Amino acid sequence: MRPVTSRHHNAAIQSNGATDATHLWRKPYLLPLEQNEGTPAPGAQFVSCLSVVRVPGPAVCGSAMTAGLITDSAVQDGTAKLSRRRRPQTLWALPFLVPAGAFICFIVLIPAVQAGAYAFTNWDGLTNDWKFTGLSNFERMLGDPLARSAVAHTVLLTLVTAAGINVFGVLLALVLNSKIKTKGLMRVVFFAPVIVTPVVVATLWKFIYQPDGPLNTLLNAVGLQNLTRAWLGDDAVALGAVTITIMWQFTGVAMVIYLAGLQNVPDELIEAAHLDGAGPFRRFFSIILPELRPAATIAIMLTLLAGVKTFDQVWIMTAGGPGDSTHTLSTAQYQATFVFGDFSYGAAFAVVISVIAIALAVVQQWVVRKKEA
């Protein structure tokens, strides 16, 4: 910040008919940022004693201005006073943050660190008789057929569910962002499965997939008897059946995210493209899709992270079967830990899941920052 020079003093005095410094003190002018001299124009930005303000014309500063001078010390004093006012508010917030912080620390952080440490031991989960074994559990995973198939199933399920959820989410968002009369009701209907617990959804779809369940009954009724099968008992289609269940439940999440993104697309731009002869596909790929990139980044990363950690639907519907055809990293971890009692090996699965989730989160942040730059 700079003081008002004598030229600004003279201009201010002349413009107000003043002939001495006393009158200038009573009606001082703030120095416009974009002008060097003369009476400031209306709408200009001015330096006040505490901040930069926009006013319609000449303004009067407080006691921090002496004889038309705006000093840095006045700004510093004002900033210090504001800081002292905010400080008590911060101190009052601490007692409310401590219980939540303690809960997260003792319930989430400490057990997570302990589980990571147990992955490098031979702990059985019951006694204190354990020893450090290094990377033996991870070497065991490399030679374990179940672990390798669990990794493959996790990758396949994650990619397919992420793609399906986002594609159908965009389509639903486009439809429900139109001017149809029942779009409010339809938004509720399509989002309703999201608020239902995965256990309930898995139980419902397990009933649908039964050999004598609604799906096979419908296929028989329309003359497609050759398509009926034990959907969860056939290792060729069991993983696909679970994938459809997950997509059905969580497409509503992507739909809401893309609906929010569509609010940033100017209607005037779409109407102008329509008048210029652009078809629906051209308007979507040239106008709408670029505006949806921030929303797509969030939706894709959320679905990828959810896919890596998928457990409830798989365990309720198939428990990893038939055979090992639907095992994921999460179900393999649960089976090793609570079915076979091999806690250290189960902890190794948990470490692998955590590393994958953290890597995806880091990639997300990198992509977002790169686009913002």
Image (cartoon, rainbow, N blue to C red):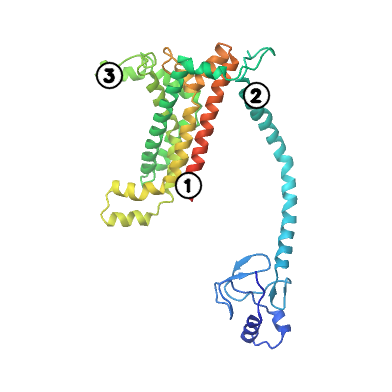
Q: Are marks 1 and 2 in contact (CB under 8 Å)?
A: no
- Whether residue 319 is visible, yes or no, is no
Q: Is residue 94 left or right of residue 32?
A: right
Q: Are marks 2 and 3 in contact (CB under 8 Å)?
A: no
Q: Nearer the viewer, residue 52 or 368?
A: 368
Q: Please provide percent x and percent y for residue 271.
A: 33, 55
Q: Amino acid at mark 3?
A: Ala
Q: Is residue 255 left or right of residue 276?
A: right
Q: Amino acid at mark 2?
A: Gln
Residue at image mark 3: 221
Instruction: Identify the residue at horizontal 42%, vertical 33% (top origin).
Output: 162
Q: Nearer the viewer, residue 54 or 351?
A: 351
Q: Nearer the viewer, residue 252 or 158?
A: 158
Q: Earlier in the sequence, mark 1 or mark 3?
A: 3
Residue at image mark 1: 370
Residue at image mark 2: 114
Residue 215 position by quadrant = top left
Q: Earlier in the sequence, mark 2 or mark 3?
A: 2
Q: Please provide percent x and percent y for residue 46.
A: 61, 71
Q: Amino acid at mark 1?
A: Lys
- Whether residue 233 is visible, yes or no, is yes
Name the quarter where the N terminus is drawn. bottom right
- Looking at the image, is 337 positioned above or below residue 5? above
